[in-house]
């Protein structure tokens, strides 16, 4: 077993603030969906219409309803939160790279550039 895997699951749960309105976080295994609360999956924001044991009915903003597994929707939320965290980390690394100072030119390179400018001035026919 990969011991790092457990930490990743916990991080996914902590980062699951992508849900709308009530912003309920699945922070542990005791997480429960609430009827009337808004959540989000790949299709978009949805409201929990009803819950019966391990199944629930959800309704998206467009009125489309579907019966689904509570566990499936929980895993989707956790995965989306994990992906969002990875994207934020990648964006942070890109910003760090863009903040690094640009390479300075050396005195030798500057000297060559000046010689090039002087040579151009000598060849003017005016």
Image (cartoon, helix red, strand yellow):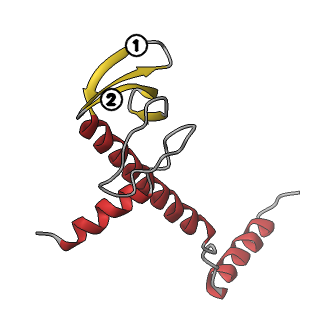
- Give the SS element for disc 1: loop
Of the numbered discs 2 and 1, the one sitting upstream in the chain is: 2
Residue depicted at x 23% and y 65%: 5
The C terminus lies in quadrant? bottom right
Q: Which residue is mark 2?
A: 51
Q: Which residue is mark 1?
A: 64
x, y percentage for residue 11?
37, 62
Would residue 61 be found to the left or right of residue 82 on screen?
A: right
- Quadrant holding the N terminus: bottom left
**45 to 92, vertically: above or below:** above
Closer to us: 78 or 29: 29
Residue at the location (63% across, 84% down)?
106
Q: How many marks?
A: 2
Q: Which mark is residue 33?
A: none
Marks 2 and 1, how far apart at CA: 17 Å
The correct choice, above or below, for 93 with respect to 45 in the image is below
Helix or strand or loop: what does disc 2 sit on? strand
């Amino acid at each position: 077993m990969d011991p790092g895997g457990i930490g990743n699951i916990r991080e996914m749960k902590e980062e699951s603030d992508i849900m709308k309105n009530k912003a309920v976080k699945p922070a542990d295994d005791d997480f429960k969906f609430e009827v009337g609360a808004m959540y989000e999956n790949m299709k978009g924001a949805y409201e929990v219409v009803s819950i019966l044991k391990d199944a629930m009915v959800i309704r998206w903003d467009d009125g489309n309803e579907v019966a689904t597994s509570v566990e499936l929707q929980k895993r989707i939320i956790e995965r989306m939160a994990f992906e969002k965290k990875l994207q934020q980390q990648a964006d942070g690394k890109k910003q760090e790279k863009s903040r690094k100072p640009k390479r300075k030119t050396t005195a030798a390179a500057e000297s060559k550039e000046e010689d090039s400018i002087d040579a151009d001035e000598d060849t003017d026919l005016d």
